[in-house]
Image (cartoon, helix red, strand yellow):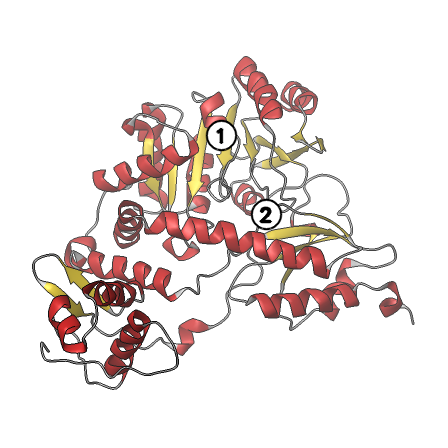
Amino acid sequence: MMDWIPQLQGGGKPRYLAIADAIAQDIQQGRLGSGDRLPPQRRLAASLGIDFTTVSRAYAEAQARGLVDSHVGRGTFVRPRTPAADPERRRAGDLSMNMPPEPTDPALIARMQAGLGTVSANLIDLLRYQSPVGAERDRLAAARWLSLRGMAPSMERIAVTPGAHATMAAILSIIATPGDRILCERVTYPGIRNIAARFGVTLVGLGMDAQGVTPEALRTAIAVHKPRALYLNPTLQNPTTLTIPVERRLALAEVLNATGLTLIEDDAYGFIPATSPAPFASLAPDLTWHIGGLAKCLGAGLRLAFTIAPSPRCAIRLSQAIRALSVMPSPLACALATQWIEDGTADSIRRFLRAESAARQAIAREALEGLAFEASENAFNLWLTLPEGVGRADVMVKMAGRSLGLIPSDAFTVEGPPQERLRVCLGGRISREDLRENVLFLHQALSPSEFMG
């Protein structure tokens, strides 16, 4: 469509934005179709009597919006129109899960969609059975991603696995048998509780202080229980949002290295903060199964994790276990994650999550002023202590039907009676405005007067 001339609207808007708006409008109204070539920038500038740089900025803006693609030497072309979203797939997510905020920026969503389009070029190849630990290109991308956490393991130890849950199940199938004991935090992630129960493994909760599991509690439990492993979620722990500081990690790693106890490190949130303490995989590499799940930092629907085994031999055993339990990670998901890592989209998603989680935490802090809770700037949740006289079951009833994910402490408690606490998820599809409204409603619902007859 080399003769296309935009009809620019007034209103004082910069001309480059007006041109980008005209491109969007003409695509919407059918005057520009998928694959149409826009006029060369200099020709359009001459036709409109404006500077070349203005048209160049306009085309760049249109590309950022996902409207066009530019190819050096070929020109600028209208992108194929995005298929209409299926409303059945736009239902709210599972509010029992600790969901990350969902991107809303059109430019970021367009980049994510473009990655899927690139991957589709190899669709037939990606529908075949493939390696249980990912293709070489995917493992190289995993190594690149893991380097963001300061890790550089040998390729023989890296596996792309079908999500953190499946990976934990595979690891337990390797290291434990029914009746064995696994140590963990006293208040821990429910997923490991469910998986351990399936394998007939008993979890033993360890004493914690403000910095996490204490070295003394770990030493004592190793001597008393003769465990097969220790499970930790050391960064932005679910549900407490606690991050174990460097000094405590060093002290715990010293105990592990002295006793030879295996560690399962669930690093689901480690990629979100701008800076996080070094993973245990860097402190006790020969003992640590490091699971860098992508559910929280890229998307749960990928069902992928980047896993580091303690040794090449352990990696082979992991490959065998994955093949037996899950066959392989989805090649389609692997290819998409790899594309996003290679073209920088993954890092853009991570930066969005970092900024958005901080904004939502600020909203929650303001809305819950006067209440006691534990939180962290980049966590997707907070750990709320209920006021005296308020029971968690009653709060759950009062909050039923609200679009706010609340889970009582029962789901997380390994040792001792559950406290009157709730995990409050701040992520998911909910907007900032709706989040504020729901958290304010929660604050009102927690008033002791609400529970008086």
List x then y, in percent, for residue 342: 27, 45
Q: Quadrant of residue 111?
A: bottom left
Q: Residues within 10 Å of mark 1 (few under 14, many from 20)?
A: many
- What residue appears at the point 27 percent right and 49 percent down from the top-left corner? 343
Q: Quadrant of residue 440?
A: bottom right
Label annotation for residue 190? 2
Q: Quadrant of residue 77?
A: bottom left
List x then y, in percent, for residue 233: 56, 38
Quadrant location, the C terminus: bottom right
Relative to 51, does residue 218 appear above or below in the rendering?
above
Q: Nearer the viewer, mark 2 or mark 1?
A: 1
- Name the element at disc 1: loop
Q: Residues within 10 Å of mark 2 (few under 14, many from 20)?
A: some
Looking at the image, can residue 403 be seen?
Answer: no
133 and 327: which is toward the camera: 133
Q: Is residue 440 left or right of residue 337?
A: right
Lower position in the chain sequence, tag 2 or tag 1: 2
- What residue appears at the point 33 percent right and 24 percent down from the top-left corner? 313
- What residue appears at the point 58 percent right and 56 percent down from the top-left corner? 359
Give the amino acid type for the residue marked by disc 2 in the picture: Pro
List x then y, in percent, for residue 336: 28, 53
Q: Which residue is mark 1?
A: 279
113 and 75: which is toward the camera: 75
Looking at the image, can residue 443 be seen?
Answer: yes
